Image (cartoon, rainbow, N blue to C red):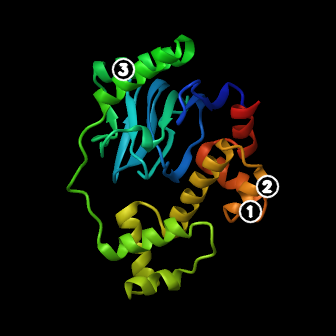
């Protein structure tokens, strides 16, 4: 899918490995808005430098770097230089990960991590199904750590997030969310963004797009996806999809079902 000269974003399934998708992007010069995925994700920077705000710190992903994101981890992405950047990613359904394991850091720069990621993409490009599974299993064993037990969020804010998770595709009012915590809407906005990296509205949109992506990959017609995720129409869905994934919902669908 071409967006401008020398810029391509290609999503697709990993053959014979259900629950794993892949992305190859080259010559990116535009950024992605702050969002999260409901999958694990890791990849490899091929060229250029990407800047990324994640875990309340600025990161620079240089060639050979392995970027890593846990489910629900808010981040953005954009070019750190005018030339843009190129990279590959895999997205993994959490159901495929044994135990409560996490990526302890947002990036790895060591040779074993880069080699493991490179083996995954080599296997995806030209390996057998068994080769893909072996490479992916080996990479996850190298990259994943035990869960971070120190990470926590105040109970009231967690309850607001649970409401957004459960009702993300329904109309919600800021005053109603603030009432859950018994504080003003302004204090809720500040507290929620400090805890989760997004305002309640941006969190809701990221959750909606994550649901929309799952529905698309399940073969749901786009009109039903838009309606089921709370969008006025497919055009409204596409506007948010491009802001988060860099491509339209229709192009993603064609990548998996053409």
Where residue 254 appears, x then y in whole percent?
75, 35
| Badge 2 vs badge 1, beta-carbon distance below 8 Å | yes
Is residue 143 something that shows in the picture? yes
Q: Residues within 10 Å of mark 2 (few under 14, many from 20)?
A: some
From the image, state whether disc 2 or disc 3 is nearer to you: 2
Q: Are marks 2 and 3 in contact (CB under 8 Å)?
A: no
| Above-or-below relation of 52 to 61 | below
Mark 1 packing: few (<14 Cα in 10 Å), some, or many (20+)? some
Please name the residue that numbered disc 3 is placed on. Answer: 116
Q: Position of residue 179 (x, y in %)?
A: 44, 87
Which quadrant of the view contains residue 65?
top left
Q: Quadrant of the N terminus?
A: top right
Badge 2 is on which residue?
Answer: 223
Q: Please name the residue that numbered disc 1 is placed on.
A: 227
Q: How many marks?
A: 3
Whether pointer 1 and pointer 3 mark residues with C-beta atoms closer than 8 Å, the reply is no
Earlier sequence position, callout 1 versus callout 3: 3
């Amino acid at each position: 899918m071409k967006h401008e000269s020398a810029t391509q974003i290609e999503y697709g399934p990993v053959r014979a490995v259900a629950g794993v998708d892949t992305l190859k992007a080259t010559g990116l010069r535009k950024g992605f808005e702050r969002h999260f995925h409901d999958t694990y994700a890791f990849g490899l920077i091929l060229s250029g430098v990407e800047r990324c705000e994640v875990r309340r710190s600025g990161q620079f992903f240089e060639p050979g770097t392995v970027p890593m994101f846990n489910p629900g981890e808010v981040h953005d992405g954009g070019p750190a230089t005018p030339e843009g950047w190129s990279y590959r990613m895999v997205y993994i359904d959490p159901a495929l990960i044994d135990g409560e394991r996490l990526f302890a850091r947002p990036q790895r720069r060591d040779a074993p991590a880069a080699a493991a990621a490179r083996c995954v993409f080599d296997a995806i490009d030209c390996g057998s199904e068994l080769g893909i599974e072996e490479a992916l299993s080996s990479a996850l064993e190298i990259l994943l750590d035990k869960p971070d037990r120190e990470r926590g969020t105040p109970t009231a804010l967690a309850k607001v997030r649970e409401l957004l998770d459960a009702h993300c595709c329904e109309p919600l009012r800021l005053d109603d969310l603030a009432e859950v915590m018994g504080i003003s809407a302004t204090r809720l906005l500040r507290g929620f963004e400090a805890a989760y990296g997004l305002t309640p509205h941006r969190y809701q949109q990221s959750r909606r797009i994550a649901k929309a992506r799952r529905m698309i990959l399940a073969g749901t017609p786009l009109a039903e996806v838009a309606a089921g995720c709370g969008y006025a129409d497919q055009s409204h869905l596409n506007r948010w999809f491009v802001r988060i994934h860099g491509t339209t919902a229709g192009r993603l669908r064609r990548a998996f079902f053409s």
